[in-house]
Image (spheres, rainbow, N blue to C red):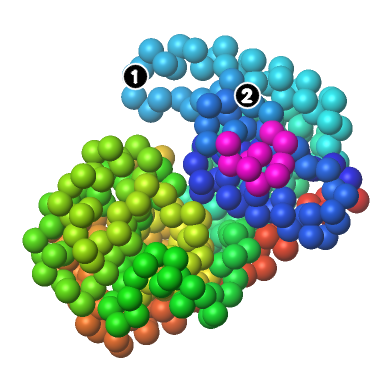
């Protein structure tokens, strides 16, 4: 059996794709898996690191504002469709899986034209443009949120949740290991703050500008992921050098970071929310205002409506960071309520369920 998996651009697309591939291999280690991604995007590094082959397309998104970059898009699309056809003809997949992102469009479009059964995985509560365009060509659409029939045909929908990395499935025995790994102490409350795989300027600036208040929080320790794009700008700021703050470019052991955290402050990407639900952590969400269709606000609002998370607007975060963090840390009842409600969104078997659906489509 051969499976083609396409998509990427951000960790929110890449890591679910890898989780699906891992789940397929658990069912049958002889399943042959090939990824298609976008040249010069992070999947070209992350997928081989996870042990899977990948081929790249010359493709990017359309700029929503007037831009000269859009002039090259038709040429990129034609090139990507042609190369996708060549890859599919050579690989001969039994099923094609699209997880969203630029490369998913031409790859799944061509797979459908070549009569390969297609499955889509939509991470967000508001679907991206690629999956909207591909929905008519898919046999099944796996979603993470309810009420998605307003975007997709109801008979195609399966509410599986988002696939997440296997190491998050059980954190009960990892607390002491986490303290040792990050060199933190047990008798302090811990805040985990990160801006997704690429980092967040808003979250980083709030940390830098609140140095005095953070310094005064002697009973609190903060694990702060700055992101590769922001390390040069923020790694030498006063906040990064405080004794109760550990600033790092990237957290390679998110399982340990979650295991140690009392509260999490982060963006509202779909994968992050799925991870928070699985590990059961009280969360303060700061949706990014610059993502397509403002989907992070919609993701966060779905949780806020169920009292499963707290949301702060991006332009209010700098002033609200410390007061809101203190409010949650001091209110155990609020923490327990947030924890209990966010766990209702957890779908620990998402990757396995999607893998079984892929296998059924192949048959």
**Circle 2 Cα neighbour tier, 10 Å, few/some/many (<14 / 14–19 / ≥20):** many
Q: Is residue 130 visible?
A: no
- Residue in the image at 78% along x and 55% along y: 24
- Whether residue 22 is visible, yes or no, is yes
The image quadrant that residue 95 belongs to is top right
Residue 204 drawn at (x, y percent): 25, 49
Looking at the rendered image, the disc whose residue lies closer to the viewer, 2 or 1, is: 2
- In this figure, which residue is indicated by the disc labeled 2? 57
Name the residue nearer the viewer: 338 or 119.
Answer: 338
234 and 76: which one is in front?
234
Residue picked out by circle 1 = 66
Residue span colored magenta: 45-54
Quadrant (top left/top right/bottom left/bottom right) for the N terminus: top right
Residue 48 within the segment the image draws in magenta: yes
Q: Is residue 259 magenta?
A: no
> In x, y percent, where is residue 253?
50, 59
- Which residue is rendered at x = 27% and y = 69% of the image? 221
Report which quarter residue 104 is drawn in.
Answer: top right
């Amino acid at each position: 059996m051969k499976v083609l998996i396409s998509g990427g651009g951000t960790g929110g697309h890449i890591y679910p794709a890898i989780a699906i591939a891992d789940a397929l291999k658990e069912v049958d280690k002889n399943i042959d898996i090939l990824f298609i991604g976008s040249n010069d995007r992070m999947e070209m590094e992350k997928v081989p690191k996870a042990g899977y082959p990948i081929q790249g397309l010359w493709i990017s998104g359309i700029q929503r504002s007037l831009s000269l970059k859009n002039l090259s898009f038709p040429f990129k699309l034609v090139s990507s469709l042609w190369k996708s056809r060549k890859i599919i003809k050579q690989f001969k997949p039994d099923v094609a899986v699209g997880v969203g992102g630029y490369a998913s469009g031409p790859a799944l479009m061509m797979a459908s034209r070549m009569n390969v059964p297609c499955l889509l995985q939509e991470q967000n509560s508001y679907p991206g443009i690629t999956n909207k365009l591909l929905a008519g060509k898919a046999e099944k659409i796996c979603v993470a949120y309810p009420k998605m029939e307003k975007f997709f045909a109801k008979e195609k929908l399966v509410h599986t949740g988002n696939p997440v990395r296997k190491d998050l499935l059980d954190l009960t025995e990892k607390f002491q290991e986490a303290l040792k790994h990050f060199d933190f102490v047990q008798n302090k409350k811990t805040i985990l703050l990160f801006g997704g795989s690429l980092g967040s300027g808003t979250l980083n600036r709030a940390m830098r500008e609140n140095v005095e208040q953070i310094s005064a929080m002697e009973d609190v320790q903060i694990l702060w992921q700055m992101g590769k794009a922001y390390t040069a700008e923020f790694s030498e700021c006063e906040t990064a050098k405080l004794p109760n703050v550990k600033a790092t470019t990237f957290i390679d052991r998110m399982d340990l970071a979650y295991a140690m955290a009392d509260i999490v402050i982060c963006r509202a990407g779909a994968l992050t929310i799925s991870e928070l639900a699985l590990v059961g952590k009280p969360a303060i969400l700061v949706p990014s205002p610059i993502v397509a269709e403002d989907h992070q606000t919609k993701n966060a609002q779905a949780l806020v409506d169920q009292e499963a998370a707290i949301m702060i607007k991006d332009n209010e975060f700098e002033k609200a960071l410390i007061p809101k963090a203190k409010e949650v840390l001091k209110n155990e009842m609020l923490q327990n309520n947030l924890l209990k409600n966010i766990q209702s969104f957890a779908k620990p078997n998402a990757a396995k369920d999607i893998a079984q659906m892929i296998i059924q489509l192949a048959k």
